[in-house]
Image (cartoon, helix red, strand yellow):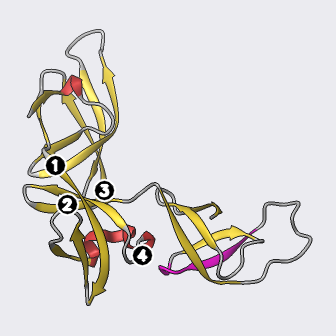
Amino acid sequence: MKIKATEIRNGTRLELDGEVYEVVDFLHITPGKGRAVVRSKLKHISSGRVIERTFSSSDVLERAEIERKSMQFLYRQGDNVVFMDMATYEQVELPEEFLSDALKFMKENMEITVIWFRGKPIGVELPPKVELRVTKTVPGVKGDTVTQAMKPATLETGLEIQVPLFIEEGNVIIVDTRDGKYVERA
């Protein structure tokens, strides 16, 4: 589907040079003389790399036709990760590097959204927050509650984050998947 450059908004997915990009930021600029332009920051869906691109207001762009599938993370198998389509129960193997940082937030039997473009998976969308168990942390120091002191903790997926001093091994906590930070105790 074609759209004008002036119609792009944050979250719009575009196909450029056979790749899918998501608009992260845009700015319509109308100079006193000359043509209006749209400056944009685009995030590559698969790699996460951000590029800047300027479009003329008369440019016509191709909106990426993507499909979202709810899939369940089953298990790791060698260098691959196995997912099951929740609608068809079909299993799909994806390479670990395809998931990049998302794998740190995923535990077995978790449902995530896999983004497909032209019949191939190109990315994943995690829920905004996930619950993970603390497997390793040092004991907190009693009486040090005035400051918002933090300590390192290792979670069941291997992710290492900073948590408040009152968190202990075995606690289940909520982690924000966008920035990888502690939110609260579950």
Disc 1 to disc 2, C-alpha distance: 9 Å
Q: Are marks 1 and 2 in contact (CB under 8 Å)?
A: yes
Amino acid type for the residue under numbered disc 3: Arg
In the image, farthest residue toward the top = 32
Q: Earlier in the sequence, mark 3 or mark 1?
A: 3
Residue 66: which disc? 1
Residue to which mark 2 is pinned: 122
Front-most of 15 and 166? 166
Front-most of 159 and 87? 87
Disc 3 to disc 1, C-alpha distance: 19 Å
Residue 107: which disc? 4
Amino acid type for the residue under numbered disc 4: Lys
In magenta, the rendered stretch is 150-158
Predominant SS along the magenta part: strand
In which quarter of the view is residue 38 placed? top left
Amino acid type for the residue under numbered disc 2: Ile
Residue 4, placed above or below residue 104:
above
Horizontal side of residue 105 vs 145, given as left or right: left
Q: Position of residue 62 (x, y in %)?
A: 10, 37
Q: Earlier in the sequence, mark 4 or mark 2?
A: 4
Structural crowding at the residue carrying mark 3, measured as other residues with C-alpha within 10 Å and reported as few (<14), some (14–19) or many (≥20): few
Q: Are marks 3 and 1 in contact (CB under 8 Å)?
A: no
Magenta-span inclusion, residue 140: no
Q: Residue at position x 43%, y 73% from top?
A: 104
Asked which secondary structure carries label 4, the reply is: loop
Quadrant the N terminus occupies = top left
Q: Position of residue 3 (x, y in %)?
A: 13, 28
